[in-house]
Amino acid sequence: KAVVSTQSTGGFEDLMEELSVADHEEDVEEKEAEEKEEEESVENLLFHGHRSDLKWCMKDYRPPKYTYVRYRIPCAIREEVLQSNRVRRVISMLCKQTGRSQEQLDTEASAILEEMGHEFSMTILRCIGGLIRKIFKQIITEVTVHKEGIKELRRLSSQKPLLLIPTHRSYLDFILVTWLLYSYDIKTPVIAAGQDFMFMKGVGALLRRCGAYFIRRSFGKDKLYWALFTEYTQTHIINGDAPVEFFIEGTRSRTGKSLQPKFGMLTIALEPFFDARVSDVAICPITLSYEKTVEENLHVRELMGIPKPKESTTGLIKARAILDNNYGRIHVKAGKILSVYDMAVGKVDRKVRALVPRAVIPSVHPHERSFVNELAYKVLIEQQANAVVFPCSALAAVLLAHIKNKCWSVDICKAESELMWVCDLLIKLGCNLIWDKKQHSQIDHVVHMLAPVVSSDGGRVYVHKSPPTTDHLSSSVFRQCNSLISLGRRRNEFMHIVIHIAIIAKILFHPKSRDRTLNQYSRLRDILQYEFIFMPDSFQSDFDRNVQKLIELKLVSFSNNVYKFIDMKVKDFLVSLIDPFLVTYMDSWQFCISYMPRTLQHSQSLKSLCTRIQTYVSVLYCEPYLYGESINLNVIENSILVLAKLSLVSIDKGKSQVYCIDPFNFSNMIREFALTIRPITAKL
Amino acid sequence: MAGVAMPYLMQWFKDELGARVSEYSPPQPLDLSKIPSPVRNIEFMEAARPWCKVMTEDAEDRLMHGHGHLCEEIFMLRNNMYHDQRIPDLVVYPSSHEDVVQLVNLAVKYNVVLIPMGGGTSVSGALMCPKEETRTIVSLDMTEMNRIHWIDPENLMAHIEAGIIGQDLERRLEKEGYTTGHQPDSLEFSSLGGWVATRASGMKKNLYGNIEDMVVRIKMVTAKGTIEKSCQVPRISAGPDVHEFILGSEGTLGVITEVTLKVKQLPECTKYGSLIFPDFEKGIKFMQEVSRQKIYPASIRLMDNAQLRFGLALKPEKGLIERFTDHIKQMYITRLRGFNPAKIALCTAVFEGPTDRVNKEESDINRIAAEFGAIPAGEANGKNGYLLTFSIAYLRDLGMNYGFLAESFETSVPWDRVSDLIKNVKQRIIQVCKEQGIRDGVPPYGSARVTQCYDTGACCYFYFGFYAGDLPNPLEVYSILETSAREEVLANGGSVSHHHGIGKVRAQFLEDTISKAGKQALIAVKHGLDPQNIFGSGNLTGVVGPTGTLKSKL
């Protein structure tokens, strides 16, 4: 606590100093800035509004209010939740079931709400906002914001309850969204956050005051907790106190790709609509693209199986080294706002719920469930469509291709020309790739953004092997794979753009008929469904759209009902992007078919199975390693999860009992899969 | 109401709706030259002539019998858009039950369509003629059948012909010291037969009941003969009540000719009252509590803020002293009690009956109201509140002169959903207006009131209006708006209609409301009673049975 306060006073003095200097110049600059703004569709959040951070945090902030809002202070919200139908009903039910007295349960409920609820305070938010802006100016080159979307968001914020669903790559996501909304005079959100932060002394309390409310990571069958949490979330939506923000991916993605959506929170958030408590809910998918995330190194280590350190205030202070680095650029885009009402037309019949009185806790109907499911994927795909790709991701792909050919360093001119080629290709494929126009030497800057894994000495670009650590993996494996996984993460940032055509490129190793291509495309897509985001039940249209694109770009030809990939260079590049995943799946499955338990008695937990696979793979190859994915626990886990989806393996809910249920079909599938990815297996 | 100056009305139009005086667009003069010429059935005309008081093919008469009071119908009328519409070919005025029996027989014999009409105040499209109908359509105007056959002071019943108009009925009963107590908003023009055929509801239903509670006996002439009960008793157990087929049949099964109604002695005392609530939500909670305690004044209603202001705009010109006292009252409410003028809601009540009971009811109401933070607002405001109800149709005409389209609709809903329903429906109207590109700066008007309380729920009544003067397709927008509003009502657990009926505009929602099998049952009854589709208005279930001359002969 003490440290935090010294930090803020330090910040405050600086601010005062700055204020006295900046005061005079400001008006002129502001005018100029305004004129500029009108021309551009994006603007830099770091210098939005007042130049002085102090002035900025005291700025006139009058966000539009939701039409039907009743003003409530945080403790009044908690009290209303406690008195709500849902909570009253659950408590009286628990009284009967458990024999506990109502007072006891009431006390428990109040305690849970105390633990969960936010303590929103505008004053604190302003102070922290100023401090954060100051820090950001130090570590971030620029934060660009797409203005169009944010204006629409502001316009709608008075008309409909809002759900903000940002991508989740970094802890900074929380901060950035709130900051963004404050800057543009939109009511700052309440945020459903994991409890990890809550235990950080001081920080938890501060976050609460900025609108975060905390949810236990697991509360499986605790009916009281479930009721309180549901009601607490819903009351904010119904009354429209503030936009409700949560992450559809559930947790930060460590891999640079979108995670599979979680449906629980979205279902809870949409229930007020299904229940006709509100006439519509507006969902705003927000995409935050980072040139380099602050947590990169930690995430890479987690992917290799080194557990993440517990969030703590001391940990945060230790991590202040972060402040010495530069994390490049961040791009924020509020995507197309989805009206739940519009999308539910013909899919959700709200009348069904109207037959259940408000006093009875409603259950979620199957048609509502499938609607939520579809919507979740829509949100993710919209998020991906709005993502920005930075050139360093393209360089990562270039370097990985070289490492596959056992070159850990590349001539800088070669690297630059290949980088340009990849960037051009990505732009052609519809990727929103942005260069930093302010940099003198693009390649130097891009290399710098991949540091410390990559560096250059003017003549060559080097990929470094990490310093050794003690772990279950031998240190030489670790040294190489740390860099490989790190670069793989970066490459993943644009995988959503190429995944469809990479699959097609893989299939079109030989020219194939339309039916066979489509068939294999759908098969591979099924296999990779945990790895990438595919809109369920739309493989046909996705296929047609992407093949069309390939034909238009003259990469693929179509004659006599046969597709043929013409451009070999592009094909090889695309295949090199997808191969790491396919090979890892193959390795993982080959282990599984031989060693995976086949009965419930012998079953083992998913986690230990994945670690075994990882160890097996790490000794399977002799150095140097081809792909980081091979020992990436996330990819390995996905390869098992998909087996469960295909009914070959059984995984229980707690993921503690995994065993093979259909070895016969499993081995058949491996054989078939081997044929699909033949060129690689032949090499092995 | 006539002759009273309303100085605040025009200002309200300007402030709330953004009306511009410069955009005055009066109705076009009626152009009868374009009215389609009638489909004649000479044989029927000859045979029917002895059985009607008047028979006419006059274009204006035919036109006036081809529409009700839907916004859409009035708009078409004002703009001479009836030239390509199907309207009645002949209008006949029977003067007795016997006449009607003969006319229906002839209609069956000569295969012509009959559409019964009373006051013509339908707001469901019930009087529109089906476009595909090729037979002669005869409008059966019932208004010449307006006699009161008898009043029974012993059993408190009256036997009345169905064509009588509401205000005439009340005036004549009043002379004898009685009243039916049925007081729909359309009382000035609507007829007894119409009330029965649409399941009407009156403002004072708490005391006197809805129309289904009032009828003792009904006579309806169908293509297969007259349906009637042989006794007039307070209750009967003789299978499903055949009256239930008649109530709400909307002219699809036959013509209602005579009705025996309950009557009551005129109340000893009538008193108005009003209460101001800090917000609409509190008012709803109050209404619910009143129902729970079963303290039912003859009428009790709750207006939202928008409607309250609309009502105030109708106040007549005031003297200096009145204005001064108004100011004091306003100060008291806003300054001392801290009510927000943009949020307050007004509850109005009518108390009727013996003086002591009226006083008891009034004090009970005030007691409960105080618990919900309300302030009594006097009798004048109460009376004024009801003025809006009766004048709304006139005001719509006035609004149309300035390019506004407006309509009212209603629904019934359980108590726990009343406030959400009202909020959501208003929001939906605003949303659709925005999507349809209604002129910026002219907010659509949407207001609501709770007009009836029941034990388990309430009836909600909405007014909505929007500026359509610069829209290329006003009727289309209007229809989209109405459909979405109704869909929102249904999604919120509301009914398709509390008392306006189905007609044609809400027919699309019938099957969803009463289930497929339920609709099938209605169709079966229609088939059984009217296989030739003589009563071919196509209301309720849509057109059931033949519509053309040839088909029907086969």
Image (tube, helix red, strand yellow):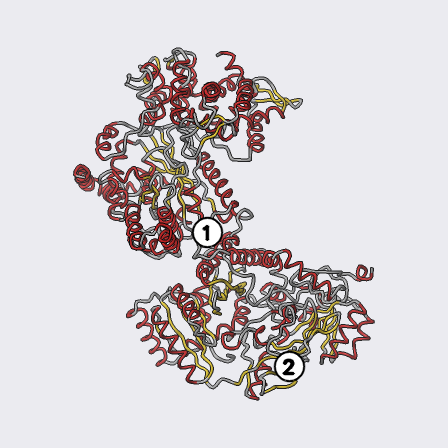
Identify the element where label 2 is drawn.
strand
Q: Amino acid at mark 2?
A: Ile
**Label 2 marks which chain's residue?**
B
Identify the element where label 1 is drawn.
loop
**Label 1 marks which chain's residue?**
A
How far from the left and from the top, in percent, is residue A336?
A: 46, 42
Q: Amino acid at mark 1?
A: Pro
Image vertical order of residue B146 relative to residue A495, above or below = below
Image vertical order of residue A665 relative to residue B431, above or below = above
Cα distance between the residues tagged 1 and 2: 50 Å
Left-right relation of B137 to B215: right
Same chain shared by disc 1 and disc 2: no
How far from the left and from the top, in percent, is residue A644?
A: 49, 29
How far from the left and from the top, in percent, is residue A180?
A: 34, 41
Left-right relation of A679 to B194: left
Mark 1 sits on what residue? A362
Residue at (26, 49) in percent of width and height: A121
Residue at (74, 80) in percent of width and height: B53
State which quadrant residue B323 falls in: bottom left
Q: Nearer the viewer, residue B525 or B258?
A: B525
Does residue A517 show up?
yes
Residue at (30, 67) in percent of width and height: B338
Mark 2 sits on what residue? B160
Mark on residue A419?
Answer: none
Q: Nearer the viewer, residue A436 or B100?
A: B100
Image vertical order of residue A350 relative to residue B380, above or below = above
State which quadrant residue B251 falls in: bottom right
